[in-house]
Amino acid sequence: MAENKIDIDRFVRLSKVLTGAANLDPATAEAYLGRLREEYPAPVTDVLTAFATIEKDEHLVFEVKRRIVEDKALGSLAQKIIAIWYTSEFVGADNKPKTGTQEQFYSGLLWQVIRAHAPTNSKLNYGDWKNPPAGR
């Protein structure tokens, strides 16, 4: 199912609040939204609807925490949104991991946070692992 631009934009804005990341790729967002909606159609709609009611609030982070993250019905999907952006993986409705593409895995926010490259995605020479990452 192709995602509509309004939902993609809203998903990006919500994802920025949930992940703390300022720059999220819209194409990746579209793919992630599609994957989440495939597993959780009603909860995705509910989360986007809930976010639409608060997205212009001056206390947005607080309201997302209060109305989405801490909500019994919506909190689980908020966790999945965070997981998909950091690792490209989330737990599906069948309770099994749903992995992303290799490109999505490589672009996971996790690698930026820990200042490392994703396994199998290095331009370093053999043996460079013995040196600490740059910037430390």
Image (tube, rainbow, N blue to C red):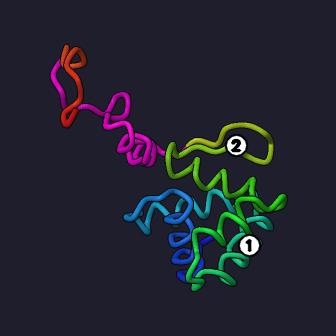
Q: Earlier in the sequence, mark 1 or mark 2?
A: 1
- x and y percent of residue 44 in the render? 72, 66
Crowd class of label 2 (few under 14; some 14 to 19; many from 20; radius 10 Å): some
Residue 74 vertical placement versus 95 (above, below): below
Q: Amino acid at mark 2?
A: Val
Q: Residue at x 40, y 46 (%)?
A: 103
Q: Residue at the far right: name it.
A: 72
* Quadrant occupied by the C terminus: top left
Q: Amino acid at mark 1?
A: Thr
Residue 62, quarter of picture: bottom right
* Callout 1–callout 2 Cβ contact below 8 Å: no
Q: Secondary structure at mark 2?
A: strand
Q: Residue at x 43, y 59 (%)?
A: 21
Q: How many marks?
A: 2
Chief secondary structure of the magenta portion: loop
Foreground residue among 118 and 110: 110
Q: Residue at the far left: name it.
A: 125
Q: Residue at x 60, y 81 (%)?
A: 55
Q: Residue 123 colored magenta?
A: yes
* Magenta extent: 100-126
Q: Secondary structure at mark 1?
A: helix
- x and y percent of residue 110 in the render? 44, 42
Mark identifier at residue 53:
none
What distance separates the C-alpha of mark 1 from that of mark 2? Answer: 18 Å
Residue 122 vertical placement versus 85 (above, below): above
Q: Which residue is mark 1?
A: 45
| In-image side of 6 versus 20 (left or right) | right
Mark identifier at residue 91:
2
* Quadrant occupied by the N terminus: bottom right
